[in-house]
Amino acid sequence: MPLTLRSNRSTLTQFLIEERRRFPSASGDFNALILDVALACKGIAKAVAYGELAGVMGNHSAEEGGTVNVQGETQKTLDVLSNDVFMRRTEWSGNLAGMASEEMDDPYQIPKQFPRGNYLIVFDPLDGSSNIDVNVSVGSIFSILRAPQDVIDSGRDVVDTDFFQSGSQQVAAGYALYGPTTMMVLTVGGGVNGFTLDPNLGEFMLTHPKMHIPEDTHEFAINASNSRFWEAPVTRYVDECLAGKTGARGKDFNMRWIASMVAEAHRILMRGGVFLYPRDTKDASKPGRLRLLYEANPVGMIMEQAGGRASTGEMPMLDVLPTSLHQRIGFVFGSKNEVDRIERYHREPLKAEEKNPLFAERSLFRD
Ligand code: FDP
């Protein structure tokens, strides 16, 4: 058992206070908000850890209010519970003007009995939750934006368009990962820092200061069962990785797919790699699977702040101007040189044989 009380690591609170000293005019509201989010994540971590013992596994029952969210996805009991924890822990403090979540169709209004503040929070309360029943690591992702000035001045209810800010306007972004240890990874600009939840103290302790993603990698992550729907530049990239030493890349690659984006993001932050959930032709109504506001933007900010990159495949993710609250988008992130390469493949004109992946020189379908 580690002697955590004698450790001289910073707590998340200490870290935030020390950061704030660099901005003497800061009110402290922002730090209070991050600490509320951290408390929400500790609560969700507990619920996830108790699992079946707490009776929180499986699908959310129709009797309790429905089973499908705005995305058309089956809600897990833990999705609904985590969403509730996030709302309850952050709505009361007077720091938020409104919030939006993967699990709610419309923006959530801060109840009248509470004061309204200067920030908006957007979150995915339990990313990777379709895997929760098989005990795979899942997490919560959040993005903090400034509320538009007229929202702050008037105190009016928030509407969808108030959240339509590009990722580059995020004030902070982070995720909690509920894995063998519970971690919180946070950027408030100026780098990325990782905190591990000390179960003895109930505090997030700074264990991974100044996280940095290696620029090169030999690991890629993609759901290969979608390969027949990929666009040619993605097929080209993956085929070259699969060809390994014998192909254009001249080195062997390893593939990973946890199917829990927050866990993949963490792996990439720790040791490099590239993740692709690209735009594809599987479903014309869905230009990508992942959501811009509460998945791609916060993870994108973390990647860029850690020296990696985040892209739609064609352009920097953080430059995209959102057009809807639950907008889906192709998402490529991780080691800088790989993401640059994938963007370059999207820009380069295609050779005839690359236009149809079935006939690509090297394709997953080739005998
Ligand atoms: P989930 O729906 O379980 O929350 O958020 C979308 C996501 O998980 C990502 O975390 C994950 O990478 C992806 O879906 C998994 O998609 P596939 O089922 O296509 O592998």
Image: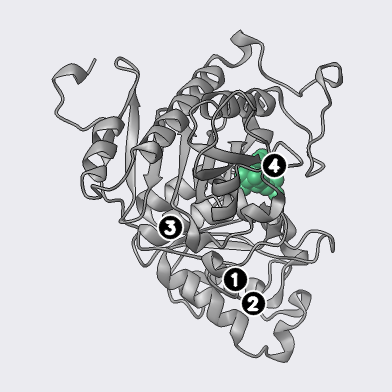
Q: Quadrant of residue 80?
A: top right
> In the image, what residue occupies the spot 50% across and 81% down?
248
Horizontal side of residue 346 vs 38, given as left or right: right
Q: CA distance from mark 1 to mark 3?
A: 15 Å
> In the image, what residue occupies the spot 86% across and 21% down?
62
Locate residue 164, reporting x and y percent. 64, 58
**Residue 367 in the image: above or below residue 133:** below
Query: Mark 4 or mark 2: which comes first in sequence?
Result: 4
| Residue 303 tag number | 3
Q: Which residue is mark 2?
A: 233
Q: Nearer the viewer, mark 3 or mark 4?
A: 4
Query: Mark 3 or mark 4: which comes first in sequence?
Result: 4
Locate residue 184, reporting x and y percent. 40, 36
* Mark 1 residue type: Gly
Disc 3, SS: helix
> In the image, what residue occupies the spot 59% across and 71% down?
313
